[in-house]
Each structure stands twice: as C-alpha cells, then as structure tokens.
Image (cartoon, grey):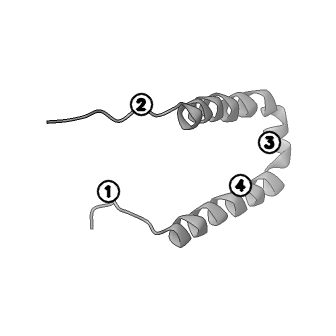
Amino acid sequence: MKLFAPTTLRWWQFSLLKLSMIALGIMLGVYLHDFFLRWIAIVSVVFALPAVYLLSVWLRPSPPPTLSN
C-alpha cells in the first residue's frame, strides 16, 4: 500500500472527505475550546494566510489558449 500515491476522487467522495474534515474541526473546537482560546490569534493567522493565497489562485484568470503546431 502506497500511502502518498496520487489518487483521483469522485465528487461525492471528495464531498464526504470535506464533510468529515468539517465535523472533525467542529469536534476539536468543542472539545478543546479552552486551549484554542489562548491561541486564537495564531490560529486565525494560520487559517487566513493560506485562505487568502488559495482564493487568489482560484480567482486568478486563466491564461488564454495558445495555438500549437
């Protein structure tokens, strides 16, 4: 078994993955709320920086198609 082998997920499999990650985040937030309250600024930055980068990549216009011979 190759743990980090490339794989392709169908849309419903990706949806299940996202749903489980959201549920995990909620469970950890509920269980560890006192711990993360002390680190809320750092956790916010760890969320915001990748989110802004990914949004900029996602919203960047794609280059026009080129003609190849």
- Residue 21 x, y percent position in the rendering: 63, 59
For badge 2, the amino acid type reads Pro
Whichever of labels 3 and 2 marks the residue nearer the N terminus, that label is 3
- Residue 35 x, y percent position in the rendering: 80, 42
Q: Residue beneath label 3, please?
A: 35
Q: Residues within 10 Å of mark 1 (few under 14, many from 20)?
A: few
For badge 4, the amino acid type reads Gly
Q: Nearer the viewer, mark 1 or mark 2?
A: 2
Label number found at residue 6: 1
Q: For the residue labelled by badge 1, is the local secondary structure a helix, a strand or a loop?
A: loop
* Outermost residue to the left: 69
Q: CA distance from mark 1 to mark 2?
A: 26 Å
Q: Nearer the viewer, mark 1 or mark 3?
A: 1
Camera-side residue of 63 and 15: 63
Whichever of labels 3 and 4 marks the residue nearer the N terminus, that label is 4
Q: Residue at x 75, y 32 (%)?
A: 44
For badge 3, the amino acid type reads Phe
- Residue 37 x, y percent position in the rendering: 85, 38
Q: Is residue 30 above or below residue 20?
A: above
Q: Residue at x 70, y 28 (%)?
A: 45
Q: Residue beneath label 2, please?
A: 63
Q: Residue at x 29, y 57 (%)?
A: 5
- Residue 62 x, y percent position in the rendering: 46, 34
Q: Residue at x 35, y 36 (%)?
A: 65
Q: CA distance from mark 3 to mark 2?
A: 45 Å
The reply to whether discs 1 and 3 touch (Cβ–Cβ < 8 Å) is: no
Q: Nearer the viewer, mark 3 or mark 2?
A: 2
Q: Residues within 10 Å of mark 4 (few under 14, many from 20)?
A: few
Q: For the residue labelled by badge 2, is the local secondary structure a helix, a strand or a loop?
A: loop
Q: CA distance from mark 2 to mark 4?
A: 36 Å
Q: Residue beneath label 4, please?
A: 25
